[in-house]
Image (cartoon, helix red, strand yellow):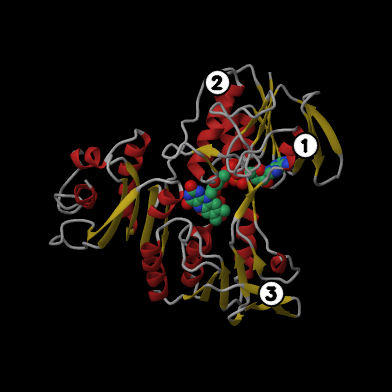
Amino acid sequence: MRIVVVGGVAAGMSAASRARRQSPDVQVTVFERGDWVSYGACGLPYVIGGEVEDFGRLVARTPGQLRDRDIDVRLRQEVTGVDATARTVTVRDRETGRTLTEPYDRLLLATGVSPVRPPWAVTSLAGVHVLRDLPDGQAIEASLEGAKQACIVGAGYIGLEMAEALSTRGLEVTLLEKGPEVAGRMLDVGLQRRVRAEVERQGVDVRCGVTVEGLTGKEGRVTGVDTDGGHVPADLVVVAVGVRPNTDLTRAAGVRLGETGAVAANDRQETSVEGVYAAGDNTESRHRVTGRAVHIPLGLTANRMGRVAGVNMAGGEARFPGIVGTAIFKTFGLGVARTGLTQAEAEHAGLDALSVDVDSTDHAGYYRGAAPIHVRLTAERGSGRLLGAQLLGHTGSVKRVDVVAALLHRGGSVGDLFELDLAYAPPFSSVWDVLLVAADRAG
Ligand code: FAD
């Protein structure tokens, strides 16, 4: 059994490792067009910000370690074509330009996403970056030399993480966002405003409702960003305006795309073409709260999809359970977490939803270090079915979002949440934890 994996980061490497463990008889080959495999892209902002000492720390396993496990890792090899009838892939060696044809019995497309680059961001000016992979991170690091003013375009979670990272490195940071507020795709409006207030409090110049019109440069280096609200001087620009799934190969293979534009796969990660699997950021998943297809490209989803694909490709049986849209990030000292649906998303999905907001402290107010925490809990009116939660608080405190995520997986209600025996001692929580208070109010 010959398993070929295209893409060697989260989904691809999880699949390769899992297939190898599932069956010693399979031959596993991973083609990666870049220079790196098996690393945590999620850590990139923290290397740039100085929290993690170097990019090498993000690597989970080197190609050598993977080869020792009998996984044939081939770097700088780009898969350029798939013949799903002959069951072969065409591979181009990026160093020599030579191509070869490789047969497969099972093929996994774990090709991830690419950052969106608006036309104005397609430039040869130095100092203009996206942040998607490890070389992007290294390029930003190199551009930091002598840089004083950064402009980040896009205030999603990567833009907000980078606002912290670049401020920490001593740059003056301007954050531009086309939408009316920051973190627009993650939170309801009231919470978006709170995040913005915190980022502004940290000295970042946040400008929302602003459209970028172009870049200015001098002697080959960027000098600023032109917007419909004026010019923003900058010697470092990070463009973080979203991603799109890498689907060129799936099209070539005749694989069906889903309604979100990402690859459609069933819960065994099989695509519409026999023998071809898909996993990770390029693939859509089923939202367990709405039952609909969604494309929410995140790390655990990619790893889990890869694991499921690996087991199945090697002859085992595993199913991807779907997701509930859980996400978390931090910007400066503020932790931001969400799971399920926001009020706006629930309404958009046609649900009759109500949300309650609770402001409290993350542990007993009398115990030192108590910090504010805000919970917004969303439930279906009448039935009390939990629909989602959003939390803002001191970094680690918002990880309690996982309690709600667990209940969402099981279709739980606010009553179920209220009944939970949650851990309590003054340094960790109030006796009635903020989640229980929110559940009580929503009930
Ligand atoms: P990728 O990591 O994109 O890997 C796909 C690989 O396929 C790439 O290396 C690419 O070179 C290769 N490839 C593509 N096409 C070909 C081809 N034709 N031939 C050969 N190789 C090919 N997620 C979280 O859950 N939490 C976080 O905090 C978080 N933070 C993030 C911060 C940043 C800055 C970034 C960029 C992402 C973050 N993510 C986070 C998202 C997370 O990193 C991704 O969900 C995860 O990396 C997806 O893994 P993947 O294997 O599907 O895709």
Q: Is residue 424 visible?
A: yes
Percent of width and height locating residue 442: 24, 49
Q: Sequence order check: which comes first, mark 3 or mark 1?
A: 3
Which residue type does callout 1 highlight? Ala
Above or below: residue 327 compared with residue 317: below
Q: Sequence order check: which comes first, mark 2 or mark 3?
A: 2
Q: Are marks 3 and 1 in contact (CB under 8 Å)?
A: no
Quadrant location, the N terminus: top right
Which residue is more in the foreground, 216 or 376?
376
- Camera-side mark, 2 or 3: 3
Above or below: residue 271 compared with residue 170: above
Q: Are marks 1 and 2 in contact (CB under 8 Å)?
A: no
* Dot 3: element: strand
Report whether the residue tagged 2 is closer than 8 Å to ligand 1. Answer: no
Which residue type does callout 2 highlight? Gln
- Would you call the spot at circle 1 few (<14 residues within 10 Å), some (14-19), or many (20 or more)? few
- Per the image, the residue denoted by label 2 is 22
- Per the image, the residue denoted by label 3 is 214
Q: Horizontal placement of 140 versus 381: left or right? A: right
Which residue is more in the foreground, 121 or 202?
121
Q: CA distance from mark 1 to mark 2?
A: 29 Å
Q: Is residue 42 visible?
A: no
Q: Which mark is residue 252?
A: 1
Percent of width and height locating residue 419: 19, 38
